[in-house]
Image: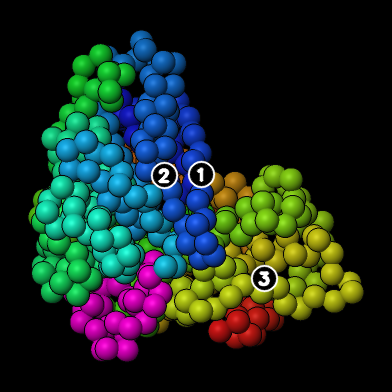
Amino acid sequence: MSLILAIDQSTSATKAVLFDAKGKVLDKTSRSHRQIYPQPGWVEHDAEEIWRNVLAVIREITGRNRQKLSRLAGLSLSNQRETVVVFDRKTGRPLHNAIVWQCRRGVAICQKLQQRGHGPMIRCKTGLMVDTYFSASKLKWLMAEKPDLAAKLKSGEAVIGTIDTYLIHRFTHGKVFATDFTNASRTMLFDVGKLRWDAQLCKLFNVPMGALPEVRESATRYGETDANGIFAKPIPIVGVMGDSQASLFAQHCYRPGAAKATFGTGTSVLLNIGHKFHVSERGAVTALAWVWRGQPTYAFEGIINFSAATIEWLKNQLGMIQSTGEVEKLARSVADNGGVYLVPAFAGLSAPYWSPDARAAIVGMSGFTKKEHIVRAAQEAIAYQIRDVLDMMRQDSNIKLRHLHADGGPTRNQFIMQFTADITGAELKVSDVAESSAWGAAMMGLLGLGLCKSLDELAALPRDSKSFKPKMKSTQVKQFHDGWLAAVKRVL
């Protein structure tokens, strides 16, 4: 049986996962990278460090599986989506730290665009809200604040890419400068209806169109690589997707009405809405889920900035816990949240509020409040935010959404899973494959390599999941959610 090696380059780490053609995980490894905070609200990554980590995880996993490498059919790639890097066209070396999707340095630019009436045009072309979450405003900031970079981009000496583009360029020693549709659509420079870079948007954000990569379908080939000599011979790079769309694909959400939530640093909730592009009337963005054989599939997406990142904040910033593995036990050690709500607006609030100026708060504390209540409130906040997003999508799509597929590391926390099912009123079907983003990219690789011929054939691949059904009484759900909404109102 052929094997696929998938790289999942996420916000916090780079993972390598070795799959067989039926989705069984044969081996995996991971390496974290630094989170760089130049000033409050700014977030960067060292793209050179990420490249070194990619090679390191490949070296580690191939070193343990040398006898299996003769069956390695291809390398697939999923990645954090909106994070953007400017790099040298010839050498591939980054010319500035990658600016991360969490970074808020473009807020003022977005506000000016809204004030000047550009919001509706941008939304109609891209499906996105005018928000610095997406790449364009941060690129505009770079062009204005770094004249040397701007000159290199205009001359063609430098180019722009999301992380997939940067890694493909490095993998192929500069031979391939390309991205896929899912990543291109997150830049706010791409017309998702016409499936092309948009000249009007590029001019608005002062981005040279010549600095942007070729856009391809996820299942096409993106050249070959020997991973700087790690592989004995070059293998094809095939199967490239943004991580959230990749997990939607891995969850077999191929038909309109199917939805998933990826629990990670943030949470992305995606609902398949079919082949026709249309804009949400409320706070959802319209995502390009994938393009297959020339036909696009679209999805409504609700974006949550802080999910597992809130737990990391409790550990790293407050020292309230020693490890994230403690939080489930602490949450269960108290009967309820004691009236405490944690609103994790550390980088504003996104869907359905889209309030970049909102700031985090812990409300409802009293002399009775213990550490356990705050830790529980941090976990409950993940579920409340998903409830807000699902309510928005239910109204926009007229779909009841009784089921929600779930994946990602925090799905191992059964308290969060059950509380999410209770608060949302949806049955959670939690994938047994935590590496869903990597597997979704690998599934696209199977299509591109001809190892699977159709989406129906992919849908027939085995898939195991654990179910969490709503159990909480409706009166208690309403009481808890009303308390959350009151807490949110205080930070808006």
Q: Is residue 289 left or right of residue 270?
A: left
Residue type at numbered disc 3: Leu
In the picture shown, does residue 472 fall above or below 51?
A: below
Q: What residue is shown with label 2?
A: 46
Question: Foreground: 397 or 165?
Answer: 165
Residue type at numbered disc 2: Asp
Q: Is residue 131 magenta?
A: yes
Quadrant holding the N terminus: top left
Q: Is residue 193 magenta?
A: no
Q: Is label 3 in a helix, a strand or a loop?
A: strand
Q: What residue is shown with label 1?
A: 34
Q: What residue is shown with label 3?
A: 342
Disc 3 crowd rating (10 Å Cα; few below 14, some 14-19, many 20+) is: many
Residue at the image point whose x is 47% and y is 76% from the top: 356
Q: Is residue 302 left or right of residue 182?
A: right
Residue at the image point whose x is 30% and y is 72% from the top: 128
